[in-house]
Amino acid sequence: MKYASFKTPDGRESYGIVDGDRVIDLGASRPQLPTLKDFMASAEFGKAANGKELKFADVKLLPVIPNPGKIICVGLNYQDHVKEMNRPDSEKPVLFMRGANSQMAHGDPLVRAKVTEKLDYEGELAVIIGKPGRYISKADALKHVGGYAPYNDGTMRDWQRHTHHWTPGKNFDNTGAFGPWMVTADALGDRATTFLTTRVNGEQMQRASLAQMIFSVEELIEYISGFTTLQTGDVIVTGTPGGVGDRRTPPLYLVAGDKVEIEIDGVGLLQNTVVQEA
């Protein structure tokens, strides 16, 4: 099942089930559950649900979870990316935070800020927490997953390297693309045969199976829940494979007009076009 957050043609923010060329608007009939995050926390989530039908083409998509409590991003979680970045192996996941206001939806412009010339792409799998928990074991971790979605952790590489902390380069407005929808946890296939692919202007830049993660989804949930309670709607962005633009020869940074696609087999295709900030 696919769930999306969106604005209806009359400007109301809502959420619903994507079914081909239509959307079942669940928010209209559930004022007690105003957001997808609230719906995920309810007993209705994942079950057959009724609502007003809209044409998918008529809604304006929002980030899957527009205002998550936490966006926890994982760095250096594919061996080929560790190698290209000339970084040592780490015994524990490398983590940083992204703010909700840095996010954008499928189809929104990916903004290259006027203070940088080094906007880079990072195709990733996002894990959306469905069931809250603390000290979650690896064995129980997937019980806490509500769904999965593509994510582009757009990065200003120069700002990322101002200090040893990555936060500035990872939090520019309109750089964290999240969508177009999330699939429920049961929809994700065998990770060994599920590939994440990033394309720029139709040319493949990144490709890796989800099984190539150094720290698996289960291991990340176990580790992160060891220091913070994971709440419904929290997002874990699980890291990018090798092939980032910053490490190509010559480097390939995004410019206005570039079309970036992040595709995950069986999950979805996220598309955004770069615009230059005035």
Image (cartoon, helix red, strand yellow):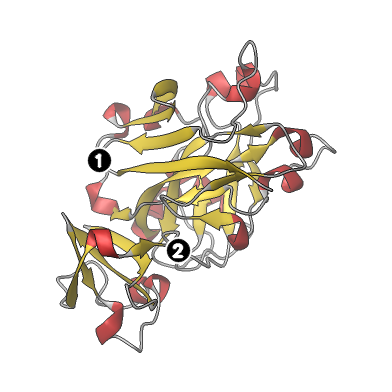
Left/right placement of residue 56 relative to residue 168 reads: left
Left/right placement of residue 253 relative to residue 212 reads: right
In this figure, which residue is indicated by the disc labeled 2?
65
Rendered image quadrant of residue 18: bottom left
Q: Is residue 26 above or below residue 198?
A: below
Residue 31 spot, x, y in % from top left: 34, 88
Rendered image quadrant of residue 253: top right
Residue 273 spot, x, y in % from top left: 48, 41
User: Which numbered circle lies on residue 181?
Assistant: none
Q: Is residue 118 above or below residue 79?
A: below
Do we see residue 233 in this rendering? Answer: yes
Q: Earlier in the sequence, mark 2 or mark 1?
A: 2
Q: State the residue in front, 270 or 95.
A: 270
**What residue sits 58% from the left and 52% below the top?**
174
- CB of mark 2 within 8 Å of CB of mark 1? no
**What residue sits 50% from the left and 56% below the top?**
235
In this figure, which residue is indicated by the disc labeled 1?
266
Do we see residue 221 in this rendering? Answer: no
**What residue sits 25% from the left and 76% below the top?**
26
Residue 99 spot, x, y in % from top left: 64, 59
**Mark 2 Cα-neighbour bin, 10 Å: few <14, some 14–19, many ≥20:** many
